[in-house]
Image (tube, rainbow, N blue to C red):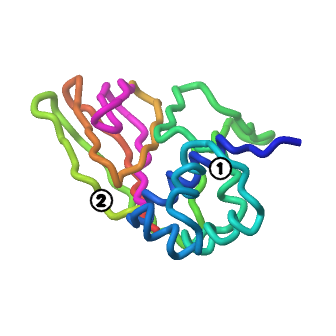
């Protein structure tokens, strides 16, 4: 069985950037050479279990996180998509759009916007995530470098610790926003 080095490489870069520490500092804390860490982040090398474990300790993450493939930064679910659960005794259905990590704080907002100037938000605290469901109208929403056009009933989530935008494309556009902070 081959090692998932490309997944490990992307995870190392993702987690190092999340910490805000330099390559040299993570290598020092893990007790490995900076060049070794650089090679691993490039997808080269054959790291031992001990090396990976030391890196996890230096990054402050569980070992399994190195083996998790990176998820897209933005997730979009269009109205009518997703797995439905339908009630037997009532005209009622539910679609789970997202789960929240334990211990996270959630704030819920109703957004009302008119076409015009873009609402560009600066990055929030590290680990912040925003979930938006357009309830009326259309809007351009998401990361400023890759926003999505959403219509009524469409859902998007994105990392709010990066620059993001909400721009109404129709009059009286409304949306529900759930802001998560860890």
Nearer the observer: mark 2 or 1; the answer is 1
For disc 1, the marked residue is 8
What's the residue at 62%, 74% (across, down)?
57
Q: Does the stretch in magenta take in 129?
A: yes
Q: Name above or below for residue 68 compared with residue 25.
A: above
To which quarter of the image does residue 87 belong? Answer: top right
- Mark 2 element type: loop
What's the residue at 61%, 68% (across, down)?
61
User: Pointer 1: residues within 10 angstroms few (<14), some, or many (20+)?
Assistant: many
- Determine which of the numbered discs, if any, sits on residue 124 in the image: 2
Q: Which residue is more in the foreground, 48 or 102? A: 48
**Quarter occupied by the N terminus:** top right
Residues at badges 2 and 1 in contact (C-beta under 8 Å)?
Answer: no
Percent x, y for residue 144?
28, 36
- Determine which of the numbered discs, if any, sits on residue 158 in the image: none
In the displayed structure image, the side of residue 36 where residue 108 appears, left or right:
left
Q: Specify start and end residues of the magenta stretch as a single range.
A: 127-150
Q: Which residue is more in the foreground, 168 or 16? A: 16
| Residue at far right of view | 1
What's the residue at 40%, 66% (across, down)?
21
- Mark 1 element type: helix
In the displayed structure image, the side of residue 124 where residue 61 appears, left or right:
right
Q: Earlier in the sequence, mark 2 or mark 1?
A: 1
What's the residue at 53%, 38% (across, down)?
72
Magenta region, mostly helix, strand or loop?
A: strand
Q: CA distance from mark 2 to mark 1?
A: 27 Å
Percent x, y for residue 5?
69, 44
């Amino acid at each position: 069985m081959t090692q998932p080095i490309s997944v490990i490489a992307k995870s190392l870069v993702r987690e190092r950037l999340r910490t805000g520490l330099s390559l040299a500092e993570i290598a020092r804390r893990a007790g490995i050479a900076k060049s070794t860490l650089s090679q691993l982040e490039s997808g080269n090398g054959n790291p031992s279990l001990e090396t990976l474990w030391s890196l996890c300790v230096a990054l402050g993450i569980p070992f399994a996180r190195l083996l998790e493939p990176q998820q897209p930064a933005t997730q979009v679910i269009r109205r009518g998509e997703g797995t439905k659960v339908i009630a037997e005794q009532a005209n009622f259905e539910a679609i789970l759009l997202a789960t929240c990590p334990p211990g996270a704080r959630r704030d819920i907002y109703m957004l009302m916007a008119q076409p015009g100037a873009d609402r560009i938000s600066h990055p929030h605290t590290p680990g912040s995530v925003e979930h938006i469901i357009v309830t009326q109208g259309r809007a351009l929403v998401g990361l400023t470098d890759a926003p999505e056009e959403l219509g009524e009933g469409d859902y998007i989530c994105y990392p709010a610790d990066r620059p993001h935008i909400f721009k109404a494309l129709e009059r009286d556009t409304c949306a529900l926003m759930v802001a998560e902070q860890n």
